[in-house]
Amino acid sequence: MDDIAQAHNPAVPEFWLRKDPDSAFADMRREKAVHWHDEPATTWFPEGGRGFWSVVRFEDVVEVSRDQETFTSGLGTEIVDMTPEMVHIFGGMLNMSGAAHAHHRAIVNRVLTPRTVEALSDTIRAHAVRSIDRVATRGECDFMRDIVGDFPAQIICELLGVPVDDRARLVELTGVALSAYGTVQAYDAMLEIIAYAEGLVAQAREQVSDNASFLRKLLAAQVDGKRMSDHEIAVFFALLVTAGIETTATSIGQGMYALSLYPEQRRRWQQEYQDLAPRAVEEIIRWVTPVRYFRRTATRDTEIAGQPIAKGDKVVMWYTSANRDESVLERPEELDFSRPEDRHVAFGGGGPHFCLGAVLARREMAIFFEELFARLPDIEVSGEPERLHSNFVNGLAALPVRYTSA
């Protein structure tokens, strides 16, 4: 490793205990575009690993994202190497490439459409109102635990037909699966989610109602005469639940914290809510970058920004660094709703793996903040956030807030 990479190694759990890991990535960006990082044995991964290339600049992250022929997802999108079965369990279509990925994505795109999301708007608003009103008389609370914690979970669970009594356990499992991403504990959590989903899929198959649920629509959807199997749908269920719950909660929670750091942006948004909402939501997602990274594997000898990359090398795209790239954005560390364009990689850098749930996440955030400002207009952060210790999700465990009791 070069000196900068040795001083700032994101493979080490202690790196993610720093108050400002963004400054470490800034050091790496200034030094060069690509850094080699060793994977020593740690409490997270006791066996260590074979090392990886860190891609830290915006344009290079976009290049790697879009070139699936050279940088495949098929061998896993986690930093740690896994068995083929673990790769499948942790990501399903996320960890596919080429024709297999295109087929699964085409089926899902026939069911998870913008029209589907629009039809969920009333449900989203109802859950936003419920989440906020349940603490409205208290005057203070924990924003993450008391308000946001289960808001996106309820929406995803409504979409997937999860009974109300089962939802708390799914939220708990999602937290384990993502905060400890790639570990044995996370794998066990994913297995439990998939086993639960297989039961729901079996029930959906037996339903005789003409009012087809989302899962029944997935069972029926086909491309070129081929359908997804029950197990494949269960794995997709796990992917949608883990991605849809934690990342949206992270974006809203960190977004609230960002608004406290940049009050002038908040004032503008509250005064011009509908006009600014699309721009504000996109800028919050960029500023937060809820998923810190995804990995690819080189399928051939190649290079990135002049750095030779050997066939089989792991290449990690640090979205959290790319979204702070000074060569792309002025003052990238600031939240600014006046930015002229949406240049960020928080939903991926484009290409075949662009986030399937982006439309739903944007809608949830826009509706949630609209209801929050209407119901608790003077809500403010009243203390320091407690951050999740994770190399994968840029989440908050707690965020104290106060407001005038409603």
Image (cartoon, rainbow, N blue to C red):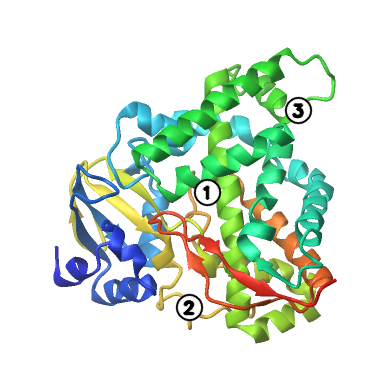
Residue type highlighted by circle 1: Phe
Q: What element carries label 3?
A: loop
Q: How far apart are marks 3 and 1 (CA)?
A: 25 Å
List the residue tagged with mark 2: 332
Q: Residue at x 48, y 78 (%)?
A: 332
Disc 1 marks which residue?
Answer: 354
Residue contact between numbered discs 3 and 1, judged by CB atoms under 8 Å: no
At label 3, the amino acid type is: Ser
Mark 2: which amino acid? Pro
| Closer to the camera in the image, 263 or 340 | 263
Relative depth, front residue between 302 and 219: 219
Question: Which residue is label 3 attached to?
Answer: 213
Label 1 neighbourhood size at 10 Å, few (<14), some (14-19), many (20+)? some
Instruction: Give x and y (percent) for residue 355.
Output: 55, 48
CA separation, marks 2 and 1? 22 Å
Q: Where is residue 265 in the image (x, y as percent from the top left)?
A: 66, 82
